[in-house]
Image (cartoon, rainbow, N blue to C red):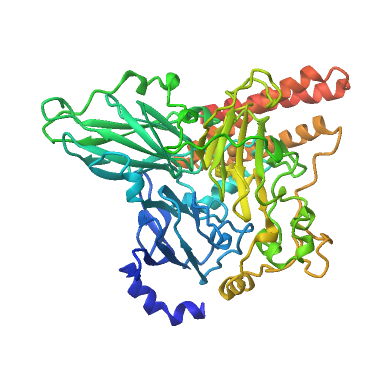
Amino acid sequence: MIFHLSVSSIWIFYTLLSVVFADTSAAKIHDLYYRVEYINANPDGVMERQVISFNGSWPLPTIEVDVGDRVRLHLINGLEDATTSLHFHGLKMKGVNHMDGPVGVTQCPISAGDSMVYDFIVEQSGTFWYHSHSGSQYSDGLRGLFIVHDAEKENNYKFDHELFWSISDWYHLPSSALVERQLTRYNPTGAEPVPQNILFNDSRNVTVNIDYDTTYLIRIANIGIMVSQYFSIPGYEFDVIEIDGVYTKPQTTEMIYLTVGQRASILLRTKSKEDATSNIAIITSIDSSMLDVVPDDLELNSINYMKYDEKLPLPEMPKWVNEPDDFEPLDDLTLIPYIPRPLLTDPDYRIELVLHMENLGDGVNYAFFNNNTYVAPKVPTLLTVLSAPQALKKDARIYGSNTNSFVLNAGEVIEIVVNNEDDNKHPMHMHGHQFQVVSRSESFEEPVHYNPDDPNLKLPEFPTMRDTVLVEGNGYLVLRFTANNPGVWFFHCHLDFHLEQGLAVTLIEAPDLIDITLPEEQIDMCKRSNVSYKGNAAGNHHDFLNLKGENKQPEPLPEGFTLKGYIALAVCTAVALFGLWSIYEFGMRDVTETETDKILIEQRVTQNYIEELEKLKLNSGSSSIESVNELNDLIAEVTLLNRKLSTL
Ligand SMILES: [Cu+2]
């Protein structure tokens, strides 16, 4: 706080400008001073809410630099009630792992009034983005585009102008309320909050002016927290030339699919004045299969325009706008890097991850890799690496039993297999690497695991490379990369609710070669946020193998108690829902949009319960009559509740 006051005049000064100092070489230094603070905004035109700004301004700026430039982003936390951090999504942060941003993994939180400088040289080019990596805070608007130019690479393609477009979901509730709603025993099925809208460049009904006969390089990033979107420009084909900072051989298509975290660059050629009979629509559509419930008032399509001329009419909407089931986006696995990289063969180390969702003893629905749900350690993992004795750095035990830590050896080819036993889709994101996508299955009704010995298995000669990729429901995903970037790298589902549910692993890559001296500033930051900056996952720096007191996941539902456990949960839920319903009945008629949404979710929850209870009844052949009666009563009760909810 003192620090902030004494220099506040400087911050105000820098509010107005970001300074670019010319270096002696061609590379530039970008000193950016951003104070995060709340302001109100109404990006969807429906509801004003609190968002997180930079220096009182939102949407956040697109940061544009050249490859080789140095960025020094001075982030000041002006939020009184929240910690923060910043991650540069897709940047490998070679040699500067402590600039990567995820709280609990590579750094301590930046507490209120504190600040941190993200200082790194940009070594990749293409379309990236930055966002808070502190809980699910970026859904409050703390995210923006980060574009890195490389004239040499861009010269491989012909275009006249460049455009930057962000797409995202948008919620009316703040991130804290969303997570609270997600992680509660009253949401035992783990239904994710449904967004109220989707945005285009942090707005709606946007019109972009364009010229005839012009080729645009359009960089598109899905900076949302939950839903994937289909992107198309009806009546126009375009060429995809980049995904996630990897330039590709051009591939012509009419539609692409972007999960949260993914980016693509496309080349779009506009028509000549003679040929253009209307302006152009840009349509982005929610992948509604990711929603537990589709509220009637949720607009699945966001329609924005490119305008040649005011006098031209708006284009006709294609039929599929109202029938979104037959979308056929380009398969990203067909996109080959511009300079193809052969498949990495013969992995030295295979990490097999079985993904599933389940309730623990506290009734909350968690996400697991190999029965372990990620729980942040008491000491950020990188700080454990830096403080551990050399002999123990490669001992996974010191990083804690609930962090899903895997130690990788330098230079090895790593294969990660994700066997998804959940019927949801998950956009998996890896920090520190652009991996090869070796194999990805379609979705299945029942879980199907990857079988490396399947004689029909055909791996690509030159695989797709990117940093975020979807695994289909009940399907599998296989990635490979070379462990050539010593550091602690988070590998997690970018669907933020799932990350909050613990869907993450920690890759501890060549910890013996991580050569970082933590800046004093970062140590002070830890002290000010009361987080230990040395020691094992439990904060013990005397005995690194003693993990007593480490953070652990809640106890499981008692063994063999599943039926009763579910009943108990259902009763709790029913009671809570009755409470909600009676509050409504007795006077709270002032139901807001959010309330409507809430009721729809509760309705879905009760519906799921009925189905779950029916299943239990079917399977309870050996249970006592008492249990069956109990179940019947419950089914009746929840059915009644479900009906009442549908009348609200
Ligand atoms: Cu997920």
Residue drawn 57% across the image and 42% down it: 583
The percent coordinates of residue 605 (x first, y second) are: 62, 32
Q: 367 above or below 292?
A: below
Q: In this orientation, which residue lies closer to the viewer: 556 or 247?
A: 247
Ligand 1 shows up in which quadrant of the image?
Answer: top right
- Residue 99 percent coordinates (x, y): 54, 61
Q: Is residue 498 found left or right of 388 in the rendered image? A: left
Is residue 359 something that shows in the picture? yes
Above or below: residue 70 compared with residue 614: below
Residue 543 position, x and y percent, is: 83, 66
Q: Residue at x 49, y 50 (%)?
A: 89
Residue 365 screen position, x and y as percent: 68, 39
Residue occupying image coordinates x 50% and y 29%: 333
When the figure is inspected, residue 408 is found, relative to residue 445, above or below; the finding is below
Would you say 458 lies left or right of 590 here?
right
User: Would you identify the image quadrant in which residue 479 lies?
Assistant: top right
